[in-house]
Image (tube, rainbow, N blue to C red):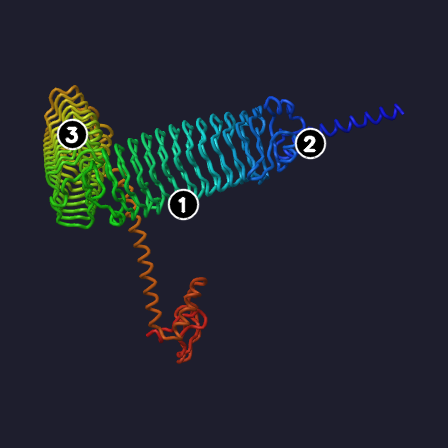
Amino acid sequence: MRSYTRIKTIILVVLGLGFVLAPTIAYFVTLEIGYSAKNSEYNDNTPLDRESLKISKSSGKIHIDNNWTAVKSAGICTGNGTYSEPYVIEDLVIDAESSGSCIWIENSDVYFRIENCTLSNSEKSYPYAGIQLDNVDNGRLIDNNCSSNNYGIYLDTSDNNTISGNNASDNAYIGLYFYSSYKNTISGNNLSNNNYGIYLSSSDYNTISGNNANNNNDRGIYTYYCDNNTIIGNTIKNSGNIGIYLYQTDDDIVTGNIINNSNGDGIYYYYCDNITTNGNDINHNGGHGIYFYRTDNSNITGNIINNNTGDGIHFYYYYYYRSSNNVVLGNNISNNYGGIYLSGANHTLLGNRMVGCGLVFEGSLEDMRSHIINSSNLVNDKPLYYYVDKDNLGSDNFTNAGQISLVSCDNSLIFNLTISNCSTGISLYYSNNNNISENIASNNRINGISLLYSNHNNITGNTANSNNYGLYLVRSDYNTISGNTAENHNYAGIVLELSDFNNITGNYANNNSYDGFYFDYSHNNDITGNYANNNSYDGFYFYQCDNNDLVGNYANNNDDGINLYYSYGNKISDNTVSDNNNGIRLYVSDSNTIQQNTISNNYYGIYIYFSKCNTISDNDFSGNTVDIQGTQEECNPLPFGMLLIIVAFIVTIVVIAIVVTGVIAKKRIEIKKSRLPKDEVARYKVLKERERYEPPVRESPVERKPLPPNVSRCPYCGTPMNDDWVFCKKCGSKSEKKMG
């Protein structure tokens, strides 16, 4: 009886222990399954300290594949997965030891929360992270430290999750990554010192707010093929490349963000549509404040854009990639290189305030005509005047001007104005027969006065100092530029690019950081009586410029007084060229005339390099270390290239003559055939065909019998022919009688 009672007691104890240990057994089973098929590091050999997980909160890696009940039974989480009582994993410390992810959850749609966990040292390859969610909805990741992983937090095909208050910094690749994930809320996280702070790919309707994404090596926030996201109130500083980059993204809202000190652009839009950019602070970035590349139908309103190295707002210009139909409204833009760089079509600019910069244009005449820009835009708190297709404008049209831009405006007068500290003071686009005189256009970011596709204008008596360039002409011909002062510029005083037949007289272009006068692909200009002294590079520089007359100018104390570079047929005479390194320099420049110049106190008076056929005569040399350095190459009347052209021309003429002769011969044959009777035409064709293959051969004379009176012989083969025959039946020749 005692033995039976003892056995019964032992059985009860064993059953009791089994009941007590059931959760632990379930925990073992749960953590050892499923992961090896996708990540081999989660296998039977993965060490997990299960007891310390409950006691000290240090844990091995966790993998949950929609098996929350077992996880709860193992004591890893609490709750029941409902909205009011979600599953909760909290206060864990997990070191993945460079293998897989710290916490990996997949195929779950119950409510859960991961809170106050420290998750580090995931495997440094895709897709391992501090927290990895695959096909997971309704999660909340709160106040976790997900640093020193490959990805801090990784979501793939996961919707309606909240990621808030986490630290996802110092990760090898991305702080927070979303792929094909929708309607998530990302707020109040620290996402710094990663390669990318936040990276969204093919993910829509997410809200990204109040995050810090600082000191990331590439981009603070990057969206790639994403739509309808809201990026609001984030701080992005010191990005290695771009602060916020939206790539082929539509219908996004970017508002209230602080984007400072990026090495590149503050915000960059690439192939985007219907973007709202509102109320952002974009300052001290190494590129443009906001950059638009093929972005349309967007609103840029109420932003503060200051002290960027590039333009405040820049619309990229190239015909196929230009932007259109954007509204730029009420922005404060200060001390950028350009205020608003406008290209593309159909933009509206209203109520913008630009200080220390202004409006810059590029595009076709049709593009410029398409914009809506009025004087509600201010430059240095003065009106911006932008006139299109207006003629005979005068002083009343430019009252207290902050900047003036004329597009297709003729016969107007811009007189006695002071326009400074903007991008370009006075600009003419496609405008002719205007008079710009006695204005001060100094201390501007780009140009004092510029002309583009503008002809027959008078630019006289203006002062344009301390700009990047003083006067800048592009594709503008037959203008008179006289009596202007263009000194102390960052680059050149007066520039002509692709501009011909201009008269440039009596201007002062001294003390510039590069050249006094710079001519680029510009021909047949008269340059007379100008002063180009004390420039760091050249007094007068010509690049591929032909047939210009440079007469009576002064070029002293420059590197090169006058420099011809691949330039031909220019006349340089009666100039004073002194105290330069090279007085006059010819570099691969032929057939120029250099005569009657005063060339003194230079190191080389005239320096010649691979140049020929130049006429150098009657110059007054004195005090030069070397008067003429280098020798001209032999002057061939016909250079080799010209000989090739002549030979090609002769060959072409000969070929044409041969072709024409053949055509004429063929036409004559056709005319001859057209005059034959129809029966003879057929016979003629047979004869000509036979001649191609069997040319007729006369038979040698032989003794023949006398013929009847009505029969004669063929004159070619001697065959007897009746008088009514037209052709010989043997050789096809025509009867002599019929021929007569």
Place of residue 64 in the rendered image (x, y in percent of width and height, measured from the top left)? 61, 34
Per the image, the residue denoted by label 2 is 26
- Give the vertical position of 82 relative to 719 (above or below): above
Place of residue 444 in the rendered image (x, y in percent of width and height, measured from the top left)? 20, 33
Residue for point 16% across, 37% down: 548
Q: Along the line of sight, which residue is nearer the eye, 3 or 568?
A: 3
Mark 1 is surrounded, within 10 Å at the Cα level, by few (under 14), some (14 to 19) or many (20 or more) other residues, namely some
Q: Tell me which corner region of the image, top left, top right, bottom left or bottom right, holds residue 250.
A: top left
Per the image, the residue denoted by label 3 is 487
Direction bottom: furthest residue? 709
Residue flagged by tag 3: what amino acid is it? Glu
Q: Sequence order check: which comes first, mark 3 or mark 2?
A: 2
Mark 2 is surrounded, within 10 Å at the Cα level, by few (under 14), some (14 to 19) or many (20 or more) other residues, namely some
- Give the vertical position of 93 relative to 725 (above or below): above
Q: Looking at the figure, which quarter contains the C terminus?
A: bottom left
Mark 3 is surrounded, within 10 Å at the Cα level, by few (under 14), some (14 to 19) or many (20 or more) other residues, namely many
**SS of the residue at dot 3?**
loop
